Image: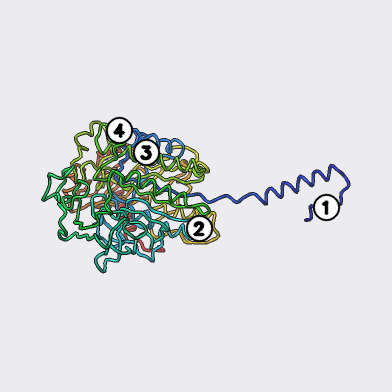
Amino acid sequence: MKIRILCMGLMSISILTACTQTKLEETSKTEEPAKQPPNILIFYVDDLGYGDLSSYGATRVATPNIDQLAANGIRFTDAHASSATCTPSRYSLLTGEYAFRNNASVLPGDAPLIINENQTTLPSLLQQHGYVTGVVGKWHLGLGTGDTALNWNEEIKPGPNQIGFNYSYLLPATGDRVPSVYVENGYVENLDTKNDPLTVSYQQKVGMRPTGTENPELLRQQADPQHSDTIINGISRIGFMEGGKSAEWIDEDFYRVFTDKATQFISSQDEKPFFLFFSFHDIHVPRLPNAKFVGSTDMGPRGDAITQVDFITGEIVDYLRKTGQLDNTIIVFTSDNGPVLNDGYEDDAVALIGNHKPAGPLRGGKYSAFEAGTRVPTILHYPNEVKPGVSHSLMSQVDLYASLGALASRYSEIDIDASPIDSENHLNAWLDHTVSGREYLLQQSATFSLRHNQWKYIAPEEKTHPWITRKGIESGLKTSAQLYNLKNDIAEQVDLSDQHVDKVAHYQKVLDAIMIKTAGN
């Protein structure tokens, strides 16, 4: 108003012109829309190893869509899941808390929800900042209370919708566990509860369905005793299932079903930013890629499943591009733990591996205390803010909680404490490949390990867990402490614990302090 009055009082045309221009500039500034908070999409692959992508050195499988994310974003060389197994890693990512604090381990298919309904989670935190949240794919964090047997014929809760997700479309546990059905927002999809109700048991056989133990001739893949219960789609699973025929999944359809559910969720968000946790079943066993991908590699189902992962990633990224959302979407692509070849089913993964190295230069794999147990391919893509590059910073998925919470708070007037007991805010390191990340990083397997700069400390463990070795993986366990210098020995071949007794003692003290840490300390 002051500018307008001043201009009206001036007789000089030149001054009037200048004032008019000033007013136009001021109007333009005031009407400029506020910067929109970014969407957040986490691609969480199952059992994908450090060396399983062509952007991380693989030559016998091509992953062009994922590689494009790496080329236009940040490719991390030292980023980690918080555990060498799936359930603990998922728990840590969503809660910002190490899974050992809740005694979380790999869950049976009928386990109760292990995340407390009153616990703040990454999705519930983002909800408070105005995000619409969704999860599509593998869950494996439990459902129900555990007080009574879960009734699959009614609303199933608590589950993801009770801990911060507005929308959920799930494999309830894993592909190798019953029930082999989809669950959407707490209800089994396509279930005929009146004429063919669903019953699940992990204690004894229910119903008359054939099992892998009794009818091995019906199997498309031979399985070990643990995976030889009820046969669904020619594959024997862990646990027994009766009824629910109309609700059964077809493994080969996962790629299309989950991709469509993801794009439908994204398309439904017009006004608010979204957070989508896209949790792949691939490349977990049983590996049954769609015919579209069979033969895409010469490594059998495991290699073809990696191709399928790349296709799904490309489909969702292309949808974001077509809808104009890609530049303002933070995409994190990573894995829940390291690789495994034979994890219960005979699908020629071992026989056809050839010179492919699923863990790249690293030692170990899924379940292992060595680096390949938790060091996983990790890519962040965010064109609006991130410059392409390669980061060698020490990073952990447990920090996504505090880091993404800090990012969301940039666009929100709500002041929320986004720092649970273990999650650290390393947003700058996630968005800038030149910024350092963690100083210390805990790794959970059958024992605990600690990373500090180039040093890797593995705590002693009395139990040997020979079942890990039987899967063709080195457990990394010894009854004495181990110490490796990863800068000179990334394959962890030379144990330096005897030469650096002081470091061993120091790292054990640091590890002990983390273990006994409590909230607020």
Disc on the earlier residue, 3 or 4: 4
2 or 3: tag closer to the N-terminus? 2
> Real-space Cα distance between discs 2 and 4?
42 Å
Residue assigned mark 4:
296
Q: How many marks?
A: 4
Q: Name the quarter where the C terminus is drawn.
A: bottom left
Q: Nearer the viewer, mark 2 or mark 4?
A: 4
Q: Amino acid at mark 3?
A: Phe
Residue bearing mark 3: 311
Determine whether label 3 and label 4 are within 8 Å by CB. Answer: no
Apparent side of residue 23 relative to residue 216 in the rendered image (left or right): right
Q: Residue furthest front?
A: 195
Q: Residue at x 50, y 49 (%)?
A: 38
Vertical placement of 383 versus 356: above or below?
below
Report whether 5 appears left or right of 357: right
Spot occupied by residue 280 in the image (x, y as percentages of width and height): 33, 47
Residue 316: image x %, image y %? Answer: 42, 43
Q: Amino acid at mark 4?
A: Ser
Question: In terms of sequence position, does the residue under pointer 2 or pointer 4 come before the other?
Answer: 2
**N-terminal label among 2 and 1:** 1
| Residue 371 rendering spot, x and y as whole percentages | 29, 43
Label 2: which residue? 130
Which of pointers 4 and 1 indicates the residue nearer the eye? 4
Q: Is residue 314 left or right of residue 252?
A: right
| Separation of residues labelled 3 and 1 (CA atoms) | 62 Å
Most distant residue in the left direction: 214
Of marks 3 and 1, which one's residue comes earlier in the chain?
Answer: 1
Q: Kindly identify which numbered label has been placed on residue 218.
A: none
Q: Tell me if 294 is positioned left or right of 277 in this view.
A: left
- Front position among marks 3 and 1: 3
Residue 49: horizontal and vertical position, in percent?
Answer: 30, 41
The residue that disc 1 covers is 6
